[in-house]
Amino acid sequence: MKKSKLALLALSVMLFSGCSTTVPLEPKEMSQSAKSFNTPPENKAGLYVYRDSFVGKVLKKDIWIDNECLGRTANKVFFYKTIDGDKEHKLSTESEFSANSLSLKTQSGKNYFVRQYIKMGVFVGGANLEVVDEEKAKKAISKLDLAKKGLCNKEHRTD
């Protein structure tokens, strides 16, 4: 009984804290430029997707937009991508058993902010997405690093 409690505690510590695992990053200059939060080009919207959760620091999770790989997250990273404005987009993140998705209707000339967060799962932590208020997101992103796009680990499942 004592050993099983110890094993569960060790697993919990690894899952919910752990050492910080990283993904490939863009140069600091690109990160700083993205943190300017400029108005997107004509007919485009800006999309910031970030992860700053304390829970599940060791986990890396893929994110897709409109079924194309945006990239792989780790704690304390963000992505920036210009996307078509005046259109509905589907964002998805890998989770424990299937992808979790979020629909986002964009307007040209606006920036949008989506936070990926890790949640407790049966075997490993799952992930989900939420739209975040601009000021709260900018404050969080100002402390994060820009991750390289297009480096998903798994094929996207739409089930």
Image (tube, grey):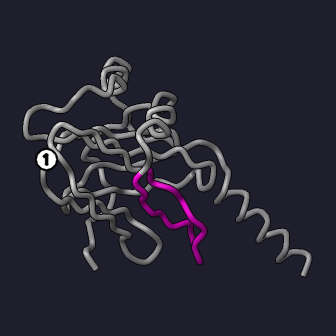
The residue sitting at 17% across, 37% down in the picture is 109
Badge 1 is on which residue?
85
The residue sitting at 50% across, 39% down in the picture is 136
Q: Which residues are magenta?
A: 115-131
Q: Amino acid at mark 1?
A: Gly
Q: Is residue 117 magenta?
A: yes
* Numbered circles on residues, count: 1
Task: Judge the density around disc 1: few (<14), some (14-19), many (≥20) Cα neighbours within 10 Å.
Answer: many
Q: Is residue 145 magenta?
A: no
Relative to the observer, which residue lies in front, 59 or 92?
Answer: 92
Q: Is residue 157 left or right of residue 113?
A: left
The residue sitting at 33% across, 64% down in the picture is 102
Most distant residue in the right direction? 2
79 is higher (above) or lower (below) than 68: above
**Residue 37 location in percent, x, y?**
32, 28
Relative to the observer, which residue lies in front, 112 or 54?
Answer: 112
Most distant residue in the left direction? 43
Relative to the observer, which residue lies in front, 24 or 102?
Answer: 102
Q: Could you say which quadrant of the image residue 99 lies in?
A: bottom left
